[in-house]
Image (cartoon, coloured by chain):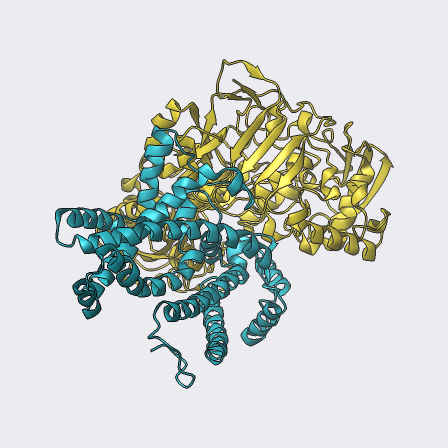
Chain colours: A cyan, B yellow
C-alpha cells in the first residue's frame, strides 16, 4: 500500500504540474489581458505598460510561470491585483466556507439518499418506487439556482422562516447564525440526492441479483440482515467512488448557491477571477481544485479497498483492479 | 482624470452608488416615523464594486468610484467637495475643507484658505498636511492614477505656506479657474502628519521633504494599504478628518464605519454606524430586498424592474440615480477601410440622425435613462450644458439622414446598401478618399453579455438600414472588445476595427468638469477613436488653460460628432427604505454622505 501511495503521489505531482502549465497558458490566451480588464476602458498605454511592469506581466511566459511556481513552492500563491489581497489569504478565507457548505450538504444528501435508494431497490417497480423516482428526477433536472430561488421565495420572502442570505462575515459567523445556512444547504442537498439515490438503487439491484443473496435467503437469513450487512456494504462501493470524485465539486461546484445566497466561497472566487482576468487567483484555485481531485481519487481508491476485500493493490500495477 | 466607462449592463456595477452630497440635512426618501437616536444603516454594494484600497494616493488598478467616493472620502476629505444639496455636480463650499480659492496674476497664482477642520487625533488640518500630499505626489506622480503629464504637479512652479491655513500655488502657466478647482484642487487630499513615516514602528518626521524620503513614505503607505487584513486595526487609518472612521473591514468587502464625533463639517453624523455590505450577485441583493431585511439602501437590478411594486410593499422607495457622464460608441477615424467615410461630417450627422434615442430609453433602458447628444451631460441639472446640445442638433430623423446622403453624391438604397455615385471632394460629392461605388457599410463590434447593448445594437442596425447604411454586427466578449481601445494608426494591424461599442462612454468622477482633454484632444491617452481636429484641440485647451467656457466645446462636439452619442442610463435604480432619511439627492459623482442620514422606527 505504501508503495502504491508513493507512486500515486508522484503521479499526482506530475498531473498537477501539467494542469498548472495548461491553465497558465490558457489564461494568457484570454483576450485583452489583465491590465485592460483591471484598469478599465480608458486606461492609457502608459497606464497599461506600468501595470504590466509592476506585475511582471511584461516578462516572457516561461519566466512568468517559473516565478509563479517558485512562489507556490514557498507558500506564496501570488497577489490578487483585483482584490488587493494575497491569494493564500483569499484561499484560506474562502475554502473553509465552501468546504463546510458543500460538506454538510453532501453528507446530508448521502444520509438521505442511501436509505432512499435502498428502499427504492427493494420496492422496485411499485408505485412508491415510481413516486420517489419521479420526485428525485424532478430535483435532479431542476437547476440549482431555480431550487434556490424557490426556497427563498417560499421560506424567506413569504413565510420569513429563514433569511435570504447565508451567514455573513468570517467563517465563525456560520456558527453564530446557523439558521442562515439552512437554505443554501437545502439547495445543494436537494439537487444532490437524486444522483446518489439513483446510484444506490442501481447498485443494490445489482447486488440483489447476486448468488450470495440467494444463498443467504435460502439459509434463512433475515431480509434486513441481508440488506444492511451484505447488500448495502457491497452496493456502497460505487458511491464511495462518486464521493471521492465529488471533492472538486465541494471546492468549486457550489458556485450557483454561493452567488444566489451571497456566500463568498471559493467557487465564486474562481468565477470572478476568470471574469476579471485575475490570473494569480485563478491559478491558485485551479491548483487547489486539482489537488482536491487527485486526493479525492486517491481516497476513493483507498475506500474501495476497505469496503471490498476482493480489491487489492498490486505493486507492479499501481492501480485498483 | 478618468474613472472609466461603464458598460450599460454592468454599468451600475462599475459605477456605484450612494447618497446625496448635500450641505444640509438633505431631503429624505420618506417621511414620518419616530426618530431613532444613532442606529446603523446598511448600504448594498453593487457586485464587483467592493472597496479595497484606503490610501488616497492610489494607483490606476484601484482607481474607482467604490474606492474613492464611497470609501476613502468617508474618512479622508479632499480640499473641495463636489456635489451640492441640489444634486448638482458643482463644488459645495460648506462641505469643502477649503474656502473658495482665489486666482490672480493672470490665473497663474492660486490662493487656498483652509477651514477649521481637525484630525480625529486632535491635530488641526493645516497647510502642512496639504504640502505633505503635494510632496508625495511630486516624487510619486507616475504611480498616481489621476496624474496627467504636463498638468499638476508638473505645472506647479512652487508653493508657499503662508500660515497654517493659507497656501499659495504658483503655476507655470495660466489655468482655467473652474477646471483647476474642479479637476485639480479637488483631488488634493490633506494627509495627517502621523503618516509621515517610513515604517510602522518608525518615528514621524519630515521625510516627505526629500525625494528619497517621499519615495519611502509613499512605499510604506502603499504597502500598508495593500495589507487589507489590518484595515480595521491599523492605527494609520484611524486618524481621519472626515465624518466616519472604519472599525471593521472584512476581505469580502464588508466595511463598518463608526461616526467620528470630532468631525468639524456642517453635518454631524446622526447614525452611530454605517455599513457597506457587498453582494455576490444582483440576484442575491434582490432576494434580501424582497425578504425585507437588513438593507436600508439598495438597488433594483434593471432587468428586474417588474419587482418595483413588491419592493414598495416591503417599505422601499424607488429612486433612479443619475450619474454624471456621457454615453457613446466609437467610430475608428484611422480605419484603413472606413476611415474616409468617418471623416465626412455629413455621414456622421446622417448616422446620428438614425439613432432613435427616445425609443432606446423607453425600450431597452425601461425608462431609466435620458437622451444624450453631446459630451456634457444634460442631466442631472447642472450649469454647463446648454439648450443646443441638450436638444441635439441631429435628433432621430431618417428623412434628414437620407437627404444628407443623397445630397452628397450617394445613391441611397433603403433596406439595402447605399453606394457612392459621385466620387470627389467637391460640393455634392461623396468626399475625399471615397471611390465610386463604395458601399456605405460598417462592421460594428459590441460587447456580448449585456442585454441592453445587444437590444440597442439590433435596433440601430434596423434604423441605419432606413438610409441604406449597412451595419454588420459582431459581438465579442467584453474583454476582447476593450482590448481594441488603445489609440492606433491606420498602418497598424490593431487599427482595422471600424465601429466599437463597449456599452459605455465617459464618467466624470473626481474630475467633474466635463471637458475633453483626455477624451477628444489629439493624441490624448483615452482618445480611442483616434479623433483629431485642430479646432477641437484649441477649444478644449481654452477650457483648461484659457478663459473659455464649455459652451463652445460642447456645441462643437454635438455638431461634429467625434463619436456617435447614445442615451445615458442611470447609475442604478436605488431602493431606499422609508425608514431611512436624508439620502436624497444622490450624488451625481457617486459619493456617499451617510452623515446626512437618519433612521426612524
Whether B590 is drawn above or below B139: the answer is: above
Whether B548 is drawn above or below B583: the answer is: below
B590 horizontally vs B466: left or right: right
Instruction: Choose top left, top right, bottom left or bottom right for residue B264.
Output: top right
Residue most extreme to the bottom: A316
Q: Residue at coordinates 70% horizontally, 26% vertically from top-left? A: B265
Residue B12 seen in the figure = yes
Q: Which of B420 and B180 is in front in this view?
A: B180
The percent coordinates of residue B569 (x first, y second) are 42, 38
B402 horizontally vs A30: left or right: left
Q: Nearer the viewer, residue B143 or A143?
A: A143
Q: Residue at coordinates 49% horizontally, 71% vertically from top-left? A: A20
Q: Nearer the viewer, residue B323 or B296?
A: B296
A207 horizontally vs B111: left or right: left
Q: Residue at coordinates 52% horizontally, 63% vertically from top-left? A: A284
The percent coordinates of residue A202 (x first, y second) are 22, 61
Q: How many marks?
A: 0
The percent coordinates of residue A306 (x first, y second) are 39, 68
Whether A214 is drawn above or below B129: the answer is: below
Q: Which of A125 and B9 is in front in this view?
A: A125
The percent coordinates of residue A32 (x first, y second) are 47, 61
A114 horizontally vs B97: left or right: left
Instruction: Choose top left, top right, bottom left or bottom right for residue A218.
Output: bottom left
Residue B454 seen in the figure = no
Amino acid at each position: 500500500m505504501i508503495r502504491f501511495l508513493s507512486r500515486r503521489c508522484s503521479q499526482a505531482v506530475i498531473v498537477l504540474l501539467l494542469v498548472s502549465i495548461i491553465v497558465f497558458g490558457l489564461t494568457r490566451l484570454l483576450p485583452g489581458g489583465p491590465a485592460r480588464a483591471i484598469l478599465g476602458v480608458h486606461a492609457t498605454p502608459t497606464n497599461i505598460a506600468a501595470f504590466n511592469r509592476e506585475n511582471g506581466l511584461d516578462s516572457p511566459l516561461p519566466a512568468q510561470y517559473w516565478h509563479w511556481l517558485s512562489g507556490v513552492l514557498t507558500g506564496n500563491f501570488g497577489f490578487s491585483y483585483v482584490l488587493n489581497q494575497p491569494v493564500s489569504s483569499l484561499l484560506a478565507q474562502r475554502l473553509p466556507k465552501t468546504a463546510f457548505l458543500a460538506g454538510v450538504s453532501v453528507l446530508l444528501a448521502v444520509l438521505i439518499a442511501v436509505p432512499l435508494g435502498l428502499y427504492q431497490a427493494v420496492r422496485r417497480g411499485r408505485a412508491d418506487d415510481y413516486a420517489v423516482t419521479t420526485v428525485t428526477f424532478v430535483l435532479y433536472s431542476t437547476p440549482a439556482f431555480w431550487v434556490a430561488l424557490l426556497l427563498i421565495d417560499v421560506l424567506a420572502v413569504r413565510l420569513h422562516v429563514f433569511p435570504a442570505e447565508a451567514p455573513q462575515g468570517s467563517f465563525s459567523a456560520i456558527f453564530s447564525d446557523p439558521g442562515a445556512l439552512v437554505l443554501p444547504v437545502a439547495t445543494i442537498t436537494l439537487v444532490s440526492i437524486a444522483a446518489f439515490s439513483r446510484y444506490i438503487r442501481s447498485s443494490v439491484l445489482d447486488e440483489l441479483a447476486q448468488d450470495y443473496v440467494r444463498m443467504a435467503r435460502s439459509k434463512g437469513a433475515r431480509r434486513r440482515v441481508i440488506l444492511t450487512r451484505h447488500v448495502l456494504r457491497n452496493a456502497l462501493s460505487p458511491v464511495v467512488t462518486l464521493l471521492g470524485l465529488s471533492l472538486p465539486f465541494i471546492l468549486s461546484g457550489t458556485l450557483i448557491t454561493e452567488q444566489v445566497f451571497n456566500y463568498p466561497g471559493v467557487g465564486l472566487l474562481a468565477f470572478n477571477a476568470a471574469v476579471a482576468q485575475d490570473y494569480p487567483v485563478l491559478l491558485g484555485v485551479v491548483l487547489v481544485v486539482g489537488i482536491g481531485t487527485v486526493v479525492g481519487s486517491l481516497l476513493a481508491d483507498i475506500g474501495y479497498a476497505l469496503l471490498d476485500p476482493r480489491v487489492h493493490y498490486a505493486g507492479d500495477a499501481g492501480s485498483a483492479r | 482624470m478618468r474613472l472609466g466607462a461603464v458598460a450599460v449592463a454592468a454599468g451600475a456595477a462599475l459605477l456605484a452608488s450612494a447618497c446625496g452630497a448635500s450641505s444640509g440635512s438633505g431631503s429624505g426618501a420618506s417621511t414620518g416615523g419616530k426618530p431613532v437616536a444613532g442606529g446603523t444603516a446598511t448600504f448594498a454594494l453593487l457586485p464587483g464594486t467592493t472597496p479595497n484600497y484606503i490610501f488616497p494616493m492610489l494607483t490606476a488598478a484601484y482607481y474607482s468610484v467604490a474606492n474613492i467616493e464611497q470609501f476613502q472620502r468617508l474618512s479622508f476629505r479632499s480640499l473641495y467637495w463636489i456635489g451640492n444639496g441640489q444634486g448638482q455636480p458643482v463644488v459645495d463650499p460648506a462641505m469643502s475643507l477649503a474656502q473658495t480659492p482665489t486666482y490672480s496674476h493672470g490665473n497663474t497664482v492660486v490662493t487656498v484658505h483652509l477651514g477649521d477642520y481637525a484630525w480625529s487625533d486632535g491635530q488641526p488640518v493645516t497647510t502642512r498636511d496639504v504640502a505633505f500630499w503635494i510632496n508625495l505626489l511630486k516624487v510619486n506622480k507616475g504611480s498616481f492614477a489621476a496624474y496627467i503629464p504636463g498638468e499638476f504637479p508638473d505645472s506647479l512652479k512652487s508653493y508657499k505656506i503662508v500660515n497654517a491655513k493659507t497656501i499659495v500655488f504658483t503655476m507655470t502657466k495660466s489655468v482655467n479657474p473652474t477646471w483647476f478647482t474642479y479637476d485639480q484642487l479637488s483631488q488634493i487630499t490633506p494627509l495627517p502628519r502621523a503618516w509621515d513615516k517610513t515604517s510602522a514602528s518608525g518615528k514621524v518626521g519630515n521625510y516627505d521633504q526629500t525625494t528619497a524620503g517621499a519615495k519611502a513614505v509613499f512605499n510604506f503607505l502603499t504597502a500598508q494599504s495593500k495589507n487589507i487584513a489590518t484595515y480595521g486595526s491599523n492605527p494609520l487609518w484611524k486618524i481621519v478628518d472626515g465624518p466616519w472612521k472604519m472599525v471593521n473591514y472584512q476581505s469580502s468587502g464588508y466595511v463598518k464605519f463608526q461616526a467620528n464625533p470630532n468631525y468639524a463639517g456642517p453635518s454631524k453624523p446622526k447614525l452611530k454606524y454605517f455599513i457597506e455590505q457587498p453582494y455576490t450577485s444582483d440576484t442575491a441583493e434582490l432576494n434580501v430586498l424582497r425578504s425585507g431585511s437588513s438593507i436600508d439602501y439598495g438597488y433594483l437590478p434593471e432587468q428586474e424592474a417588474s419587482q418595483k411594486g413588491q419592493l414598495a410593499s416591503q417599505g422601499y422607495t424607488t429612486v433612479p440615480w443619475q450619474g454624471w457622464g456621457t454615453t457613446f460608441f466609437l467610430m475608428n477615424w484611422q480605419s484603413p477601410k472606413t476611415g474616409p467615410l468617418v471623416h465626412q461630417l455629413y455621414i456622421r450627422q446622417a448616422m446620428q440622425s438614425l439613432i432613435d434615442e427616445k425609443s432606446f430609453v423607453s425600450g431597452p433602458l425601461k425608462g431609466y435613462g435620458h437622451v444624450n447628444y453631446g459630451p456634457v451631460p444634460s442631466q442631472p441639472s447642472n450649469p454647463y450644458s446648454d439648450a443646443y446640445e441638450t436638444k441635439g442638433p441631429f435628433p432621430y430623423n431618417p428623412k434628414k439622414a437620407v437627404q444628407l446622403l443623397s445630397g452628397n453624391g450617394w445613391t441611397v438604397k433603403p433596406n439595402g446598401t447605399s453606394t457612392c455615385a459621385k466620387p470627389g471632394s467637391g460640393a455634392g460629392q461623396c468626399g475625399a478618399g471615397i471611390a465610386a461605388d463604395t458601399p456605405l457599410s460598417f462592421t460594428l463590434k459590441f460587447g456580448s453579455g449585456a442585454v441592453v447593448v445587444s437590444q440597442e445594437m439590433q435596433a440601430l442596425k434596423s434604423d441605419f438600414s432606413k438610409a441604406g447604411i449597412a451595419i454588420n454586427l459582431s459581438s465579442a466578449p467584453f474583454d476582447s472588445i476593450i482590448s481594441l481601445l488603445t489609440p492606433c494608426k491606420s498602418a497598424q494591424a490593431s487599427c482595422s476595427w471600424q465601429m466599437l461599442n463597449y456599452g459605455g462612454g465617459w464618467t466624470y468622477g473626481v474630475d467633474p468638469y466635463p471637458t475633453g482633454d483626455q477624451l477628444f484632444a489629439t493624441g490624448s491617452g483615452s482618445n480611442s477613436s483616434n479623433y483629431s481636429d485642430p479646432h477641437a484641440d484649441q477649444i478644449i485647451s481654452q477650457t483648461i488653460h484659457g478663459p473659455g467656457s464649455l459652451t463652445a466645446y460642447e456645441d462643437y462636439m454635438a455638431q461634429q460628432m467625434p463619436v456617435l452619442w447614445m442615451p445615458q442610463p442611470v447609475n442604478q435604480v436605488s431602493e431606499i427604505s422609508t425608514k431611512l432619511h436624508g439620502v436624497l439627492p444622490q450624488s451625481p459623482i457617486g459619493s456617499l454622505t451617510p452623515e446626512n442620514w437618519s433612521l426612524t422606527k
